[in-house]
Amino acid sequence: MTLRRLPETLVNRIAAGEVVERPASAVKELVENAVDAGARRIDVVARDGGRTLISVTDDGCGMTAEELSLAVERHATSKLPDDDLTAILTMGFRGEALPSIGAVGRLAIISRASARGPDNKATADSAWRIDVEGGKVGEPEPAAHPPGTRVELRDLFYATPARLKFLRSERSEANAIADVLNRLAMARPDIGFSLSNGARERFRYPAEDGDLFDARLARLGRIMGRTFAENALALDAEREGARLTGYAGLPTLNRGNAQHQYLFVNGRPVRDRLLVGAVRGAYADFLARDRHPLVALFLELEPREVDVNVHPAKAEVRFRESGTIRGLIVGALRHALAEAGHRASTTVAGAALGAIRPGGVGGYQSGGSYGYRGYTPPRGLAEQAASFQSPFDHMPPSAPPGAGAQEAGAGVMEAPAAAREDYPLGAARAQVHGTYVVAQTADGLVIVDQHAAHERLVYERMKAALADNGAARQGLLLPEVVELDEAAAQRLGERADELAELGLVLEPFGEGAVVVRETPAMLGEVNVQALVRDLADELAELGETLALKEKLEAVCSTMACHGSVRAGRRLTQDEMNALLRQMEATPHSGQCNHGRPTYVELKLADIEKLFGRR
């Protein structure tokens, strides 16, 4: 077998297989080029899901005839002036997109140089066109076109027909293109975007005005929906030179998958395992494991602190200080959620109104599952939670309700002066079916699920106690040796101090093993071997001790559930009002530990609409 050089056309087709996986990949590369060219408007046409035509038109800086010829050569780029791969400030930088696309389709580029863009070149008198078909490059020819560039790609994969067999349906490919363009549009609200199939426009986003936060929220509202914009919490945090901005949805606004989690690094849309894990960890207190929040996070840091060249499609990145980045994300999200206080998403009221309207569809977050599937509590749980089970500690004694005030499971009372309607959650007026507290506000009413609400209050008290006093430990009668591979044992040993704070005391035991001497008392009888191996796997995947923290939080959650006011218990008026005031003062009280809403607020205007009064 003799070594030989592959033909240039075949080399380009191999490169295209990495860069251009499907039509959406081509759209991503071409739109990123337009963004780098300083465009303020980008229009995309994708016909037949991108199979027969992809057209990207921009009003960026454009190219001269000489630049057009160079643009379709491999590894020709204007975006690395110092040849420094550690300081990448643009979306593209490798010079592979245009030649790779031209190797597998019929490519035409029409461009006219303009003053817009980083080069600030003079606007040219005329445009130029160059064609590339199956890797064969033509000569530039004069053409008519306004300042900017239009790239047309026809018959994608005609030169590699085997790739066509792996494309999905026209609708699936069109949706993938829309998703790519939406992500890029989120990152650049100052640029106008549109997408059509040549006959029907799918969307058009105008360039947003105002400061970055306002413009970004307006763009996110157009893409993720008005509901997200109304229930989003603003983020702005910094740590060691990295800055995180963006918006995070309230926990009660959630979905059954993570498709609505958008993550950007230096303006580049990415799907990064570390970032996804950080979001999951930040919301672990508020959502069941099968529910996912809606977030749009924008991370900015020095280009030398992140490697964007680790994936052929630049969809993944690698951080130099991954622990710092994860801590920044978790901390910023948890701070924003705490600042939200007892606030719940507006969708809760909408779902309630929909359920009681004639012909309405009931159910909050239809199709959702809120049953808790966490850690099974050990025996003696009630004894461990004894100090948290008194639901109304430190409250003034309650006056008994008036005679006949709690007939048929409802209590109707006059509110004392201390229980005013101008409180955020109003004044308690009744208890319905021994389960729901009805309160009157200045402009409506609030219905509280007493068990779900008190469950959150107890849980927050338990977490505070855990933070103040640390996790109690229980010593093992006989220390247990856990055998692992050498790398896993080393990772655990490096985090021994952190694990000890959580109640797990271990130390290295030769090569490839650790010895466990104490475990968290809250876990009760625990399978030490399984716990340590799970922790080792978690550290390998995410670099953090999520597994143990989540187990402890799961036990706290279950203990809180057992130690809370149960449905069916009659409450006095003072107890109901005390519950409302505690909810107002407690972070995260708008949802229980599993992501269900703890209360529904109905405005008077909404109630009047139900009865045709407006």
Image (cartoon, rainbow, N blue to C red):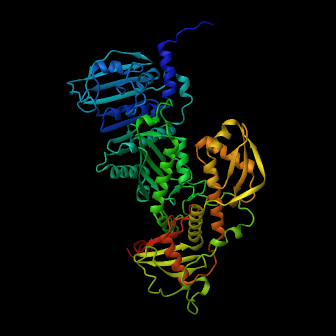
Q: Residue furthest right?
A: 478
- Residue 152 x, y percent position in the rendering: 37, 28
Name the residue located 45 percent from the left edge and 84 percent from the top edge.
418
Horizontally, is 141 left or right of 347 in the view?
A: left
The quadrant of the rendering that contains the N terminus is: top right
Q: Residue furthest top?
A: 2
Mark yes or no: residue 546 visible. Answer: no
The quadrant of the rendering that contains the C terminus is: bottom left
- Residue 517 x, y percent position in the rendering: 73, 51
Mark yes or no: residue 150 visible. Answer: yes
- Residue 164 x, y percent position in the rendering: 53, 27
> In this picture, is 412 found above or below 96?
below
Instruction: Report the front residue among 57 and 421.
Output: 421
> In this picture, is 522 found above or below 124?
below
- Residue 368 x, y percent position in the rendering: 59, 58
Horizontally, is 169 left or right of 129 in the view?
A: right
Instruction: Report the front residue among 561 and 481.
Output: 481
> In this picture, is 148 found above or below 233?
above
Instruction: Report the front residue among 47 and 67.
Output: 67
Quadrant of the rendered structure where residue 93 is?
A: top left
Horizontally, is 433 left or right of 173 in the view?
A: right
